[in-house]
Image (cartoon, rainbow, N blue to C red):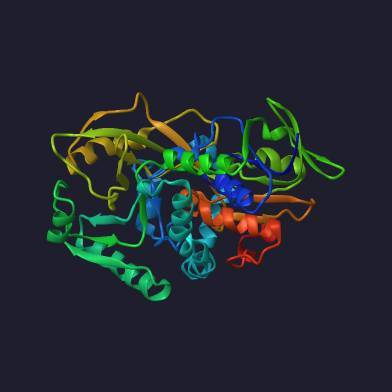
Amino acid sequence: MRKDVVVLGAGIVGVSVAVHLQQRGRSVLLVDRRGPGEETSFGNAGLIQREGVYPYGFPHDFGALLRYATNSTIDAHYHMSALPKLAPFLFRYWMHSRPEEHRAIARLYAPLIEHSVVEHAALAEAAGATQLIRPTGWMKVFRSQKALDSQLRDAESTKRDFGVNFDALSSRGVSEKEPHLSGDLKGGIHWTDPGAIYDPYQLTMAYLRLFESLGGTVAEGDARSLAETSDGWRVTTKSGPVEAREVVVALGPWADLVTKGLGYRLPLAVKRGYHMHYKPLGNAVLNRPTLDFERGYFLAPMSKGVRLTTGAEFADRDAPKTPVQLQRAEPIAKAFFPLGERVDAEPWMGMRPCTPDMMPIIGKAHRHKNLWFSFGHAHHGMTLGPITGRLVAEMITGEKPVIDPTPYRPDRF
């Protein structure tokens, strides 16, 4: 079989790349070892984070570092055995997270984020899936006045510098928006621009069906079989070998399975995360995704129930599940919102592919012809899938890119 482009990886980023290429008249094969959308894209918090111009940094506050050092929090957990291997990455991550550099990174990152909502809307419209994206925004709520005041100052700065919108909420304002929350809450911040995805997996599947309706094809295969040919690339699938002029690596946390074999030493690490769904008790309703800021967990209304998600776990990518953060969060979350019985048979775990400068790797590989990278989106893979897909497709087809891709180029490392 011969195609114009093979896209390796069928998460939200790979599917979005494939859709945009197919829309531009390229014949595309999308390859994954599992079913599309079944890895990291399945288990996120379901946000299109238009406000997220500051990527999630490594804390520089001494109190936060001391708290994380105890390894007993909900928002962060680490495996001691993994720290020696992770230490070089964590040091670089910490250095890039210094306030002045973090602000500089935000200015480079903002163009991607600024297109996140509109590009999702365009794909959702074409896929007939607009009902899966709700214009509710999301909310942070605070248990202390100190945390509320600090976050409000940051929100005002982000609004001034990047044009994102929010409403500052009193304790009463939080109760009016979310009457079933409990606790002595001092107030909240309602980010009003983001979209809330009712079912991230189903949205990815809708984009996949759009891709197939345009003539794109999907195959199961092993990305590690990728090999260069005289006029392009070849990959082996269950249906046989496929050759293409161009290949896009969109493998998220597994990108190194291909890149290392081709001689690229990119500083990619993973943050693991967990979720569990619950039935609300009685007539309780959660109207929008909500972060219990000081406790470090997130609740989101989803098609299966209320999804409880945790923060980051630093561990070897392939280590067994250790959902201790869910165990810590569950009793606190049940006191915060009336969660009933668990819906899922066991906690779900996914992995976020991260770079030390917190920006994705998007662009042409510098050592090989017709090889493209599109991974490393960390916490914002679902947010940035469609705009990344458009950007990669424009570069491959020679169109003028909608934004300058230079800050995300692979050879910056």
Q: Quadrant of the N terminus?
A: top right
At 14% from the left edge and 49% from the top edge, which residue is drawn?
183
Where is residue 111? Give x, y as percent. Answer: 52, 66
**Which residue is located at x 38 percent, y 45 percent?**
45
The quarter of the picture where residue 164 lies is bottom left
* Residue 137: percent from left, percent from top: 31, 57
146 or 81, nearer to the observer: 146
Q: How many marks?
A: 0
Q: Nearer the viewer, residue 93 or 360?
A: 360
Quadrant in the picture for residue 175: bottom left
- Horizontal relation, residue 409 to residue 86: left or right: right
Locate residue 8: give its quadrant: top right
Residue 229 image offset from top left, x and y in percent: 84, 40
Where in the figure is residue 184, as x and y percent of width and height? 13, 52
Instruction: Name the foreground residue: 171 vs 235.
Output: 235
Please report the residue visible at 42 percent of the width from the left and 60 percent of the height from the top: 52
